[in-house]
Amino acid sequence: MNSKHTRASKILSYVLRHRPDAIGISLDCQGWTDIASLIAAASKAGKHLDRKLIETIVATNEKRRFAISEDGLRIRAVQGHSTDRVDIRYVEKVPPEFLYHGTATRFLDLIFKEGLRPGSRQYVHLSRDTQTAIAVGRRHGKPVVLSIAAVAMHQQDYKFYQAENGVWLTPTVPPTFLLTLRDG
């Protein structure tokens, strides 16, 4: 991804996941906003976005963070929201036996004491593979991967969902379901 695409992707992440008000747009309860309004609001805020650039980012973003509606008029972030206005209705799913969470070593004492919490987001994000978890952990410091007994949690009525981009979501992971630790 070139620097123009990286900048635009960061703008989209910020306004579609966290602060739509930063450029004067609003999101509906499923996280959608009108693309034309997004482009106009971004322009007023001194940020360059256009239809072709947005479509390229949606199509090429390796994390598949964004989706365009079937009618092509709206866009949303598929997960990772920190705004209370958005409450995407994910379908509950049975998770694989194990899922993984990447974090930094400096957070381990608190995690093993309190479990995994969503922080400012709505859900704890989990991945199906350790490589993705390592990459996530690396963003926060010296990476470490936690293994989560997802099926065991599900059997005790903890809910799991999967976003359109494959990220697994759950409201919390109690410390008793944290199985192993692996350095990234």
Image (cartoon, rainbow, N blue to C red):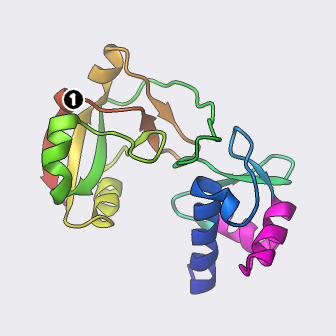
Instruction: Pinpoint residue 145: horizontal percent, then vertical percent.
Output: 22, 51
Q: Quadrant of residue 143?
A: bottom left
- 74 to the left or right of 47: right
Instruction: Pinpoint residue 131: horizontal percent, then vertical percent.
Output: 31, 57
Q: Please tell me which residue lies in front, 162 or 44.
A: 44
The residue that appears at 30% across and 22% down in the rendered structure is 153
The residue that appears at 70% across and 70% down in the rendered structure is 56
Instruction: Pinpoint residue 138: horizontal percent, then vertical percent.
Output: 28, 66
The residue that appears at 19% across and 32% down in the rendered structure is 175
Quadrant that contains the N terminus: bottom right
- 28 to the left or right of 71: left
Magenta stretch bounds = 35-58
Residue 65 appears in the rendering:
no
How many residues crowd mark 1 within 10 Å: few (<14), some (14–19), many (20+)? some
Quadrant that contains the C terminus: bottom left
Query: Is residue 31 part of the magenta span, yes or no?
Result: no
Q: Amino acid at mark 1?
A: Phe
Query: Is residue 41 part of the magenta span, yes or no?
Result: yes
Residue 98 appears in the rendering:
yes
The residue that appears at 60% across and 48% down in the rendered structure is 78
- 1 to the left or right of 131: right
Q: Which residue is mark 1?
A: 177
Residue that protrudes farthest toward the bottom in the picture: 3
Question: Magenta part mainly helix, strand or loop?
Answer: helix
Above or below — where is 164 with respect to 141?
A: above
